[in-house]
Image (cartoon, rainbow, N blue to C red):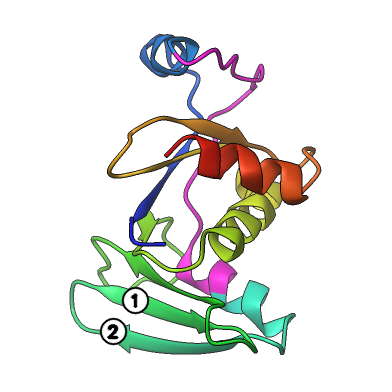
Amino acid sequence: MGNSIVMIPVMCDPEMADWVAEYGITLPTLHADSRYPTLAEMRAFFQRFPEYTVSESINDQVCDLYIQGREAYQYTPIWFREFKGDEHEPLRIHFHKGNYELVLWIVHQIAAWCGPMVVCTQSSGVPMLISHDMVFDQHLIDQFYALE
């Protein structure tokens, strides 16, 4: 739980395919690139889940969401970068530390409307593919922990 998790949209890009292939991952065939979520989408998503409290910190360049579940360990800050005030603009995000299980669940949900994502911790850099058609279960979580 001490590492930040980077989320990268899957791109129709040979360089990305080569990078993840080094780790035995084959990217799905896409008709268009995946994308980052918007702040508006993230707000709407969390409104569907009252068991999570969301607080925001916004200034002229940064927007951060702080997600807290019912249990103290169920938390993660989500950092939106390059925020310019448009909540409908897809923005690069990463999860600053927090609970891996919660982060992976959020990424799994994001993949439903933004497309498949590659995630990795900043310390290991080993990628893992997350798509919405994957089953979100303990096996998926254990796979991510094994990358560390």
The residue that appears at 43% across and 10% down in the rendered structure is 22
Helix, strand, or loop for circle 1?
strand
- Verify CB contact (< 8 Å) between mark 1 and mark 2: yes
Badge 1 amino acid: Asp
Q: Residue 3 appears at what percent x and percent y?
A: 33, 56
Q: Is residue 23 left or right of residue 25?
A: left
Q: Is residue 92 visible?
A: no
For the point 32% across and 36% down, the residue is 124
| Main SS class of the magenta portion in the image | loop
Q: Which residues are magenta?
A: 23-42
- Relative to 137, say whether 28 is above or below: above
Q: List the single residue furthest toward the left.
A: 60
Residue that mark 1 sits on: 64
Residue under the image location 72 percent in, 89 percent down: 50
Q: Where in the figure is residue 58, as x and y percent of width and height? A: 28, 84
Work out which quarter of the rendered image holds the C terminus and state it.
top left
Snapshot quadrant of residue 66? bottom left
The amino acid on which the numbered mark 2 sits, given as a three-letter code, is: Ile
Residue 32: horizontal and vertical position, in percent?
58, 27
The disc placed on residue 116 is none
Which residue was labeled with disc 2?
58
Q: Can residue 2 be seen? A: yes
Q: Quick check: 73 above or below 129?
A: below
Query: Which element is circle 2 on?
Result: strand
Q: Residue 37 in magenta?
A: yes
The CA distance from mark 1 to mark 2 is 6 Å
Q: Earlier in the sequence, mark 1 or mark 2?
A: 2
